[in-house]
Image: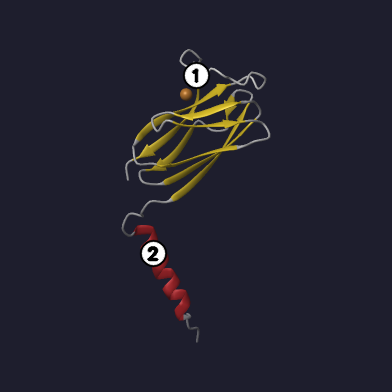
Amino acid sequence: MFRVPTVVVALAVSLALASCGAPAGPQSVQFDLAYQNGKLNKETFTARQGDSVVLKIKTDTFGEFHLHGYDLETDIAPDEPGQISVTADATGKFKITFHEKDPNSQDQEGEVEGEEEENAIGFLEVQPR
Ligand SMILES: [Cu+2]
């Protein structure tokens, strides 16, 4: 009568192992962030400890994205999407902020950033593995 091909059985077994077996190792995850009208497309982006996380960032205005905790930042512009890459070693909920910039004033003073206002627009949450 009907014989199940060996390949199908092997596939089913490996799927079963993958879904209920040992915890998976670090993953590569990518999030697409879109910042428009002062808002991010999503509030919280969730990863697991050890993951390689890439935040791809698009915006409709000039400024700087800042991932607190890991303290990584990138300048972006409407026609220049940015990216922050990080290995998520530390767990917790990390603020993603946007620092708006006037594209016409190239800041020569460099260090004078302390007073500017921070807009917390979202979070990267790193859960323990
Ligand atoms: Cu900030």
Residue 76 figure quarter: top right
- Outermost residue, front direction? 108
Kind of residue at disc 1: Glu
Q: Is residue 68 above or below residue 129?
A: above
Residue named by callout 1: 118
Q: Nearer the viewer, mark 1 or mark 2?
A: 1
**Can you give x and y, in whole percent of width and height, for residue 115 in the image?**
48, 12
**Can you give x and y, in whole percent of width and height, for residue 124 in the image?**
44, 34
Inter-mark Cα distance, 1 to 2: 47 Å
Q: Nearer the viewer, residue 18 or 128?
A: 128
Q: Is mark 2 within 8 Å of ligand 1?
A: no
Q: Is residue 107 above or below residue 82?
A: above
Kind of residue at disc 2: Ala
Residue named by callout 2: 16
Residue placed at 66% from the left, 28% from the top?
A: 60
Under circle 2, the secondary element is helix
Name the N-terminal-most of marks 1 and 2.
Answer: 2
Q: Nearer the viewer, residue 111 or 86?
A: 111
128 with respect to 31 (left or right): left
**Can you give x and y, in whole percent of width and height, for residue 42 in the image?**
54, 33
